[in-house]
Image: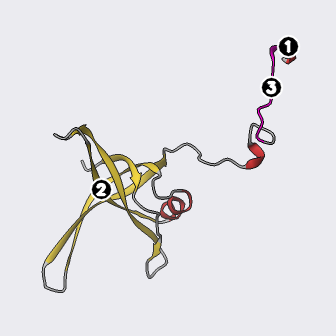
Amino acid sequence: MNHVNLIGRLTKDIEVKYTDNSTPTATFTLAVPRSYKGANGERQTDFIRCVIWNKPAEILQQYATKGSRIGVDGEVRVRSYEDENQRIIYITEILVRQFMFLDSKKHQNEDSEPFVDGQEIPIDDENLPF
């Protein structure tokens, strides 16, 4: 079984690229804190390379920015290529199958603000219909 679930923060904005046949793809790094603290008392963080394809890549780019907290579901993939010195380079990354946004909505539309002109609207118990 090859199944990975991660929760972390994006280290930079998502940049979608397109293959020769116009398939959208994006590679990004997810900063994932470890569940324990190191010897110095600080929590360590792993920086995990992820790749996402097709429409989900475009959606992620549209709605997520650097620092956004997301959850990803996917599988570990290892690929390789030969560099200019004829050395084989291996790359381990997460192939993202699904993701979810975990941040609350940061900015709301001004029309949906609960205050008028920046002032709280007082409501007392006498004005309630129940």
Q: Is residue 127 left or right of residue 68?
A: right
Instruction: Determine the CA span between mark 1 and mark 2.
Output: 56 Å
Is 53 above or below relative to 105? below
Mark 2 vs mark 3, CA separation in Å: 48 Å
The magenta segment is 118-126
Q: Which residue is mark 2?
A: 47
Badge 2 marks a residue whose secondary structure is strand
- Return the residue at label 3: 122
The amino acid type found where label 1 is placed reads Glu
Give the x, y percent position of residue 55: 52, 63
Amino acid at dot 3: Pro
Earlier in the chain: of badge 1 and badge 2, it is 2
- Label 2 neighbourhood size at 10 Å, few (<14), some (14-19), many (20+)? some
Residue 76 vs residue 129, the one in the foreground:
129
Q: Do labels 3 and 1 touch, CB within 8 Å? A: no
In the rendering, which numbered label is found on residue 126? 1
Separation of residues labelled 3 and 1 (CA atoms): 11 Å
- By secondary structure, the bulk of the magenta-drawn segment is best described as loop
Q: Residue 20: horizontal and vertical position, in percent?
A: 44, 82
Front label number (3 vs 1): 3
Q: Secondary structure at mark 1?
A: helix
The kind of residue on which mark 2 rests is Phe
- For mark 3, give the secondary structure: loop
Residue 29 occupies quadrant = bottom left
The one nearer the camera, 7 or 98, is 7
Q: Residue at x 59, y 47 (%)?
A: 106
Q: Residue 109 lies in magenta, yes or no?
A: no
Q: How many marks?
A: 3
Q: Which residue shows up at 16% across the image and 40% down it?
A: 39
Q: Is residue 123 left or right of residue 53?
A: right
Residue 76 lies, in percent from the top left, at 27, 56
Magenta-span inclusion, residue 124: yes
